[in-house]
Image: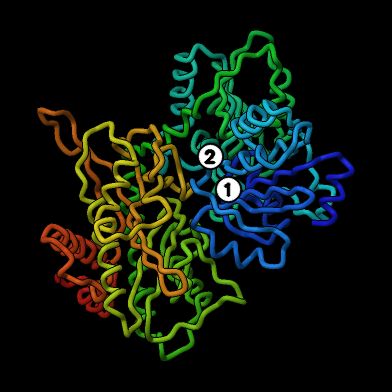
């Protein structure tokens, strides 16, 4: 902190902003760009540091309040609680505390064009100067990790259901419709989807660092070419893709011809690259079309995903059976629990890795929505209380994300009530029938209603999109309280995961993935519904049946019958008997 403030004085900077990001505006980051963690010790996936000469704060949302308070202790940073998730509320704070002629600076590689322009517009209107080209951390961070060198590969069309050529054709139709000449892509998951490529440059996300520039007759992929074997380079070339060095993207943007019209997503493009585009080039700012394209899964992706849920369900069944038979007899910690779950998943065909770090949260740790056990916090499980396990797998045939809470013994009536209300909310969301064109905030409200009826709530969103062997958090649709103007469409895969958290006591969250499907055309329009994809039993020993209506009980019993029938062929006789008891009708 002292060294950073010294550099700020040297460069005449009054406030320095460090976002949790990279040049691709990623949520999960390569080690080189874990700047917030390096500077403050906070390891959450969302947060922004703002440093002045007399204050240093971390702005983050309710998922991380408890974690941040613990990790920031003695760091010199204070926790500032966001009122709205992901909102840049620190900008208003800067407006309040900085006098005219102050200087605010940030690294334009770590800041989206949209956010940078928001900062500039608000601050410069008050005569506060803004600099978006200042990287102070590289001057301080000794032995900073290099960019990853892991190998990459091209997926076969039999997995993706659509060739690179077909995807480029779709994108070029969109470019023409926008009366433009080209589209620039920075988002790593969009890039992976468009070119049918996967890698491991980012933990848990099978993506590769790169950029894409697609014109009406050319497609250039800026990437570390050494990542691909020669056969994959040939496959890309045959699809009309030219490979260029990762560092050449900035030069390419700076050399665009006068009068050129370029499409860019200002929220998924860093300010440094955005600023490189010549003033003589027209920039059309819109959401990457590939973000929408990949959110709507094709028939092949859906088929593979359903098969993947069976694999994941078998792993989860074996895991929970092992847990029930072992807890109280052998030492199990949160860390060893996560390791054991990984072993069960690794036994399944096509398994690549975890889709995020497993949240194995025992007792009061369950009240931390994004808890990750450390050697210091690692709890030893006892045969009592609640255990929350939120985990997921990356398979070459799909991505999973599932949360379950199980009883380890001696459960209170309050815990049963809380658990049942969360389950009731999950069922309400899962059984929703809704008109085409509905938005995620409508699903969010309906899912929360059983909790609201009992004066309960949760601070995170109800659901997020999930990729196909891609990022576990995928846009553009989301089920949360924000008025995101993206309709829910047939083919989208989304989580439904209501929760309830009693700080210092326990947490409950139940999560399934659902596929949006056509339901029925009626006099009042076309209606959609959800097909539940996740296959894993829900602990009924925690259910207070009196709080459920017959529709909820029927759904639970039918769901459990489906889980048993789908998983039974892949289980041993002993495992079948165990699962039959767990999925018995209530």
Residue at image position (54%, 55%) is 204
Q: Residues within 10 Å of mark 2 (few under 14, many from 20)?
A: many
* Residue marked by disc 2: 192
Of residues 240 and 384, the one nearer the viewer is 384
Q: Is residue 298 above or below residue 400?
A: above
Image coordinates of residue 57 in percent, x first then y, are 67, 53
Q: Which corner quadrant holds the C terminus? A: bottom left
Marks 1 and 2 close (CB-CB < 8 Å): yes
Distance CA(mark 1)–CA(mark 2): 9 Å
Of residues 381 and 256, the one nearer the viewer is 381
* Residue marked by disc 1: 199
Q: Which corner quadrant holds the N terminus? A: bottom right
Relative horizontal placement of residue 290, taking residue 580 as reference (left or right): right
Relative horizontal placement of residue 123, taking residue 447 as reference (left or right): right
Q: Residues within 10 Å of mark 1 (few under 14, many from 20)?
A: many
Image coordinates of residue 283 in percent, x first then y, are 60, 18
Residue at image position (74%, 44%) is 16
Tag 1 secondary structure: loop
């Amino acid at each position: 902190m002292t060294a950073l403030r010294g550099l700020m004085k040297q460069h005449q900077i009054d406030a320095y902003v460090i976002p949790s990001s990279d040049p691709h505006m990623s949520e999960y980051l390569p080690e080189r760009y874990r700047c917030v963690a390096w500077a403050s010790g906070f390891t959450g996936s969302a947060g922004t540091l703002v440093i002045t000469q007399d204050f240093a704060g971390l702005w983050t949302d309710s998922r991380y309040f408890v974690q941040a308070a613990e990790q920031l202790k003695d760091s010199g940073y204070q926790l500032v609680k966001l009122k709205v998730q992901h909102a840049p509320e620190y900008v208003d704070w800067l407006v309040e505390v900085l006098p005219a002629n102050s200087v605010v600076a940030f690294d334009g590689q770590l800041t989206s064009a949209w956010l940078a322009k928001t900062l500039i517009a608000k601050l410069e209107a008050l005569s506060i100067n803004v600099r978006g080209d200042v990287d102070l951390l590289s001057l301080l961070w000794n032995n900073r990790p290099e960019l990853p060198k892991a190998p990459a590969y091209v997926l076969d069309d039999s997995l993706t259901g659509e060739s690179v050529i077909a995807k480029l054709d779709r994108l070029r139709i969109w470019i023409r419709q926008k009366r433009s000449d080209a589209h620039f892509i920075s988002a790593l998951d969009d890039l992976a989807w468009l070119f049918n490529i996967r890698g491991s440059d980012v933990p848990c996300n099978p993506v590769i660092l790169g950029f894409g520039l697609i014109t009406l007759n050319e497609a250039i992929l800026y990437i570390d070419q050494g990542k691909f074997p020669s056969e994959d380079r040939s496959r890309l070339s045959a699809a009309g893709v030219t490979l260029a060095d990762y560092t050449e993207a900035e030069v390419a943007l700076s050399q665009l011809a006068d009068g050129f019209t370029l499409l860019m997503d200002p929220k998924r493009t860093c300010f440094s690259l955005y600023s490189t585009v010549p003033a003589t080039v027209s920039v059309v700012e819109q959401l990457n079309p590939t973000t929408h394209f990949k959110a709507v899964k094709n028939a092949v992706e859906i088929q593979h995903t359903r098969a993947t849920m069976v694999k994941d369900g078998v792993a989860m069944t074996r895991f929970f059976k092992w847990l029930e038979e072992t807890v109280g007899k052998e030492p199990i910690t949160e860390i060893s629990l996560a390791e054991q779950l990984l072993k069960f998943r690794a036994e399944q065909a096509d398994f690549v890795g975890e889709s995020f770090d497993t949240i194995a949260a025992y007792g009061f740790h369950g009240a931390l929505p994004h808890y990750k056990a450390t050697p210091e916090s690692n709890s030893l499980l006892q045969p009592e209380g609640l255990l929350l396990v939120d985990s997921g797998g990356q398979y070459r045939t799909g991505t999973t994300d599932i949360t379950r809470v199980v009883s380890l013994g001696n459960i209170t009536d309050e815990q049963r009530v809380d658990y049942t209300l969360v389950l009731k909310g999950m069922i309400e969301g899962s059984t929703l029938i809704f008109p085409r064109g509905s938005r995620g905030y409508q699903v969010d409200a309906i899912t929360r209603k059983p909790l609201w009826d009992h004066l309960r709530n949760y601070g995170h969103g109800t659901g997020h999109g999930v990729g196909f062997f891609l990022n576990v958090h995928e846009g553009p649709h989301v089920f949360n309280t924000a008025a995101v103007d993206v309709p829910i469409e047939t083919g989208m895969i989304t989580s439904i995961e209501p929760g309830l958290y009693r700080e210092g006591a326990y947490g409950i969250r139940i999560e399934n993935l659902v596929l949006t499907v056509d339901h029925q055309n009626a006099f009042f329009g076309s209606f959609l519904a959800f097909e539940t994809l996740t296959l894993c039993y829900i602990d009924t020993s925690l259910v207070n049946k009196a709080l459920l209506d017959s529709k909820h009980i029927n759904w639970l019993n039918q769901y459990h019958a489906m889980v048993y029938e789908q998983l039974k062929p892949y289980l041993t006789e002993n495992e079948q008997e165990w699962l039959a008891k767990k999925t018995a009708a209530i």
